[in-house]
Image: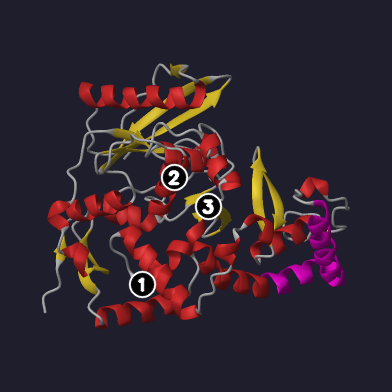
């Protein structure tokens, strides 16, 4: 049987639509509306780098430009519509997915127990008990609230003090939960005091977790390989995703498709049969220009971004400056369904300084496109600094070959 083929345009439109980047970045970004946005994405990565805006704030702002950071703190720290834990990195996750994390808790408990016990020796178990008892008796704690000494020798875990290791272990294994952040510092409390009781009461089998994790990933990616399904939440193993795909194909829920990349090459993937039947209903691309986070979920998988958009991207943090093609930390810029370049900008003393924009090869920076880019940067400045914006004299650069 002939395998259906998605053109590169169809694949981009489907993928970006599932990531909330085809709709206008308007609408409410508080309360239930913000929780719904996070649910549609599946998770929002949390990161401490704050040259322009923190990753989680920029991810949400690029989709709803009425968004303000305090709204995320409210739905996470007070309304408990989300929780913070680990996917491929620390992330804000819809509370409805919490029961799926049992599999992650059990795996991390086993994996980290051996590692951290080796690093901290025989005192590991007493330290775990001491920290857990302190949180139970005194309420929410951060690492600074714990009184202990740093390790006598390098541990391989950034020389964390034992109580910090214990807090992290108890969080990663599900005994503790992040109840709030102050600045970027995590405060931990007993999971039973953070996670709603009805959520904690949900007990899922391994098979149910695999089913729900794969369905959620496929819904949010539009099309995927089994490996991409497993990597989406980083909850289940690749072999679990392979088995699930085989079953869903047999049940005719999924179908094989060939996805056409930016270079014309095709890659086999899977998608819902129902989605294949509605490709004609995909929204048309707009000319809207958006600044994205380097950790945007649409770009997190760098190989997929390059395959789908022809956009080679990495954060040039650990590359010595003379060898960097671009700046230390540059932001991808999306126009419609095309990644048109990357921009180097940072907030300093209440001003957003635009240092350089490099268009991608083949992207012409005519007056209309430059005007749209400037309009987005003005919106970004209002979000980051209240409106103060400054351009370097040579900010508009040519593409690098």
User: On the picture, is 393 further left or further right than 368?
Assistant: right
* Of the two numbered discs 2 and 3 in the rendering, the one whose residue sits closer to the viewer: 2
The span from disc 1 to disc 2 (Cα, nearest Å) is: 32 Å
At x 51% / y 22%, what residue is drawn?
385
Residue 82 circle label: 3
At x 68% / y 57%, what residue is drawn?
193
Which of marks 2 and 1 precedes in the sequence? 2
Q: Position of residue 244 (x, y in %)?
A: 36, 78
Residue 32 circle label: 2
Which residues make up the magenta segment? 112-138
Q: Position of residue 56 (x, y in %)?
A: 50, 43
User: On the picture, is 339 further left or further right than 146?
Assistant: left
Which of marks 1 and 3 precedes in the sequence? 3
The kind of secondary structure element at disc 1 is helix
**Which residue has dot 1 on it?**
226
Quadrant (top left, top right, bottom left, bottom right) of the N terminus = bottom left
């Amino acid at each position: 049987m002939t395998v259906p083929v998605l053109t590169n345009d169809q694949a981009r439109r489907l993928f970006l639509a599932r990531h909330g980047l085809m709709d206008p970045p308007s609408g409410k970004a508080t309360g239930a509306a913000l929780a719904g946005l996070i649910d549609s994405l599946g998770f929002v990565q949390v990161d401490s780098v704050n040259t322009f805006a923190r990753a989680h704030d920029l991810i949400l702002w690029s989709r709803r430009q009425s968004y303000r950071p305090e709204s995320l703190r409210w739905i996470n720290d007070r309304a408990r519509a989300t929780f913070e834990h680990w996917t491929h990195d620390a992330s804000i996750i819809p509370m409805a997915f919490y029961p799926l994390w049992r599999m992650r808790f059990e795996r991390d408990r086993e994996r980290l127990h051996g590692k951290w016990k080796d690093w901290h020796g025989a005192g590991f178990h007493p330290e775990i008990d001491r920290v857990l008892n302190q949180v139970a008796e005194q309420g929410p704690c951060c690492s600074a609230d714990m009184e202990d000494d740093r390790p006598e020798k390098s541990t391989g875990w950034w020389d964390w003090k034992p109580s910090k290791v214990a807090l992290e272990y108890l969080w990663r294994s599900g005994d503790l939960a992040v109840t709030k952040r102050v600045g970027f510092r995590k405060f931990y409390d007993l999971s039973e005091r953070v996670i709603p009781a009805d959520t904690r009461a949900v007990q899922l089998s391994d098979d149910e977790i695999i089913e729900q994790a794969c369905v959620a990933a496929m819904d949010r990616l539009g099309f995927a390989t089994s490996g991409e399904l497993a990597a989406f939440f980083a909850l289940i193993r690749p072999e679990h995703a392979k088995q699930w795909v085989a079953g869903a194909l047999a049940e005719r829920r999924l179908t094989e498709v060939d996805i056409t990349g930016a270079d014309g090459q095709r890659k086999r993937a899977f998608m819902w049969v129902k989605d294949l039947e509605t490709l004609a209903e995909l929204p048309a691309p707009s000319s809207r220009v958006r600044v994205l986070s380097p950790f945007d979920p649409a770009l997190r998988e760098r190989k997929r971004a390059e395959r789908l958009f022809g956009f080679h991207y990495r954060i040039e943090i650990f590359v010595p400056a003379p060898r960097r093609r671009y700046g230390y930390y540059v932001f991808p810029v999306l126009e419609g369904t095309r990644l048109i370049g990357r921009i180097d900008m940072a907030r300093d003393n209440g001003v957003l300084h635009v240092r350089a924009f490099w268009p991608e090869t083949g992207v012409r920076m005519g007056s209309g496109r430059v005007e749209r880019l400037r309009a987005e940067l003005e919106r970004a400045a209002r979000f980051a600094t209240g409106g103060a914006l400054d351009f370097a004299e040579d900010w508009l650069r040519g593409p690098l070959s």
